Amino acid sequence: MTNPPPAPVNFIRHIIDADLTAGRVQSVVTRFPPEPNGYLHFGHAKSICLNFGLARDYQGRCHLRLDDTNPTREEQEYVDAIEAAVKWLGFDWGAHHYFASDYFEQLYEFAEALIQDGHAYVDSQSAEDIRTHRGTLTAAGKNSPFRDRSAQENLSLFRDMRAGKFPDGSHVLRAKIDMASPNMNLRDPVLYRIRHAEHHRTGKQWCIYPLYDYAHPLSDAIEQITHSICTLEFEDHRPLYDWLLEKVAASGKLNPQALPHQFEFARLNLTYVVLSKRKLVDLIEAKAVNGWDDPRMPTLMAARRRGYTPEGFRRFAEMIGVSKSDGWIDYSVLEECMRDHLNDTALRRIAVIDPVKLVLENVPEGHEEECFAPNHPQQPDLGKRAIPFSRELWIERDDFQETPVKGFFRLSPGAQVRLRYAYVIECTGFEKTADGEVTEIRAKIFPDSKSGTPGADQYKVKGNIHWVSKAHAYIGPLRMFDRLFAHPTPGARREGDAPELERNFLDDLNPNSLTEIQAAMEPSLKDAKPEDRFQFERHGYFVADLKDSSAGAPVFNRTVTLKDSWK
C-alpha cells in the first residue's frame, strides 16, 4: 500500500499546528455553516473541502450546521439540497448535523444576559431611522434615543417581543457597543428582529429571530468549534464575533477558556460565472436558466447533472489552495480538473453528432457482424465491447469533403480511410441535393482489412473515422453546453466604458450556452443509467442526465470537451 500524498500546506494548517503544539486546543473541530436559502455553489465546494478536509487530516470532526435564522427566505428544499451536495462531494458529518434553530432557546437566554449586563437594548426606531443614524465610513453614527433605557425596561420589552405583542418592525434588539466606531459592524448592530413568519423547523413557536452575526459566533461556542473558518468578507465582522463571545462568557453563560476563534481565507473568484446567491436568484427569475440545478448554473447540484465529479472538485480545491489574498481563477482550471479525472474513469463510446449516411456497396443487404472496441484504451482489464456493423452506417458529415483541402486525410472521392475498429473503405461516389448538401456517401470495403484480423496491417491509410450502424443506432438527444456568460467577469466595467454606464451582469449572458442536437450513438448507450459517464470519441465527456433520463431513453449532457477548446 502506498502512502497517501502529503496534505497541502497553507496558513490555516500552520495556525492549527501551532494551536495543537501549544495546547490551546486538544482536537480540531470545524464547521460548514450555510444558510438554507438557496443551493450550494462552486465557492461552497472550496469551503466544504477545506473544513471537512482539515477535520479529516487532523482526526477531528466537522459539523454541518444550517444557519436557519431567517424564516422568510429558507425552505426545506434548500436544506435537502445542501445535505445532498455535501454528501455528493464525499464528506460525512456523522452525528454532528445541527441547525441554528436547535439553539433558539439558548440564544434567547444569552440575549437576556446581555440586556441584564447593560450590553444590549431594545430600539424602537424605524428601520429607516436606524439606517440613517448609523452614519457613514467618514461620519460617526448617532445614538438611538432609546439607547439609555433601563435594563429592566429593555428586558420587559424583549420578553413582550417574544410573546408576540408587537408587529414586525416595531422593535429590534441591538448590541450596545460604540456608534462612533470606525468599524460599521460595531455601531450597535441589530441582534434580534420581529418576524411573524412560520419557520420550516420550529413552526410558529417563535416570532423573534436572531440575525446571523449574533447566532453564528454563539452557535460556534455552543458546539465547541475550535477553528471557525470563513471567507475574507467576514474579516470586518470578527471584532463583533469576539465581542459577543466575550460578553456572554463574562455573564457566566459560556466557558471563557473554550471560546472559538475566527479565521478568514480568500473566497473563490472564478471567471465566466457568478457566485452570489442574489445573482443566482436573478438568473432564475429572469428565466435565463431552468432553475437551481440547470447544468449551466454554478451550483453543485447543477454540476452533478452536468457530469462534473466530486473527485474533480476535490482536485480543484487542492490545486487552487488556500490564501489570504483575493485572486481570479480561470474557469479552464476547473474544467481541466474534471477532464483529468474523467479521462481515467470514463468508458469510451461512439456517437455521431452530425450524421450523414454511408452505404457500403459490396456489403450485402441485411448483413450484420460484430466489431470490437476497447472500453478504455489505457485500461485493458476493462475488456472490449461488441459494436454491430452493417451495410448502412452513420458517419460524421465533416469526415467527408467532395473536394478535399490540403491536409484532409478523411473521406473524399477515391480516398481510402479506415472505419475505426472495422474495415478500410474507399469512397466510390456520393449524392447531394440541388443546393449542395451531401445526403449519401457510397464506398466499398476491403474484406481482408478488418481490424484485429491477420493481414489487416497491410493496409496503410492516414485517415481513421468513427461510425455507428444505421440499423442499430440509438438516436437520442445530446445537450452541448457552453459557458453561461460570454465575458470572464460578468457585469464588470470594461475599458472605455463611459463613467455613467452601469453594466447589468445579465447583459453578458452567452446566447449559445445550450444547443440540443439529435445524435446517432452506438446501441449500448440506450441502456445508460442516470449519471453513467462516457467519453464520446472525438467529442468530449458526456453524462446521462440525472433528472431527464428515463429507462431506454437517456439524455446526454456534454460535461467538458476533450481539451480546452472554448474561445
Image (tube, grey):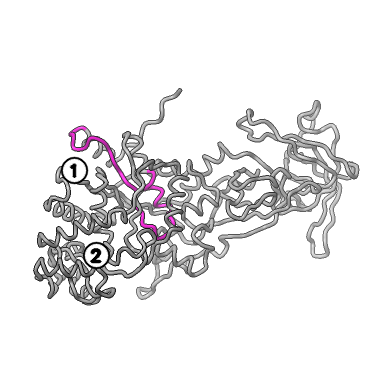
Residue 460 in the image: state x and y as whole percent: 76, 33
Is 536 magenta? The answer is no
Residue drawn at (49%, 53%) of the image: 301
Estimate how packed mark 2 is, as few (under 14), some (14 to 19) or many (20 or more) residues with alpha carbons within 10 Å: many
- Residue at which label 2 appears: 192
In the displayed structure, 376 sits above or below 151; it is: above
Quadrant in the rendering for residue 279: bottom left
The residue labelled by disc 1 is 258
44 within the magenta span = yes
Against 136, is 303 above or below?
above
In the rendered structure, find residue 426 and report the number of the disc placed on it: none
Q: Amino acid at mark 1?
A: Ala
The span shown in magenta is: 21-49
Horizontal and vertical percent position of residue 180: 12, 66
Label 1 vs 2, first from the N-terminus = 2
Question: Who is closer to the viewer here, 323 or 121?
Answer: 121
Q: Residue farthest to the top? A: 1
Q: In the image, is 21 to the left or to the right of 474?
A: left
Label 2 SS: strand
Q: Is residue 369 left or right of residue 242?
A: right
Which of the 4 image quadrants contains residue 11? top left
Nearer-the-camera pick, 388 or 96: 96
Query: What kind of residue is marked 2?
Result: Tyr
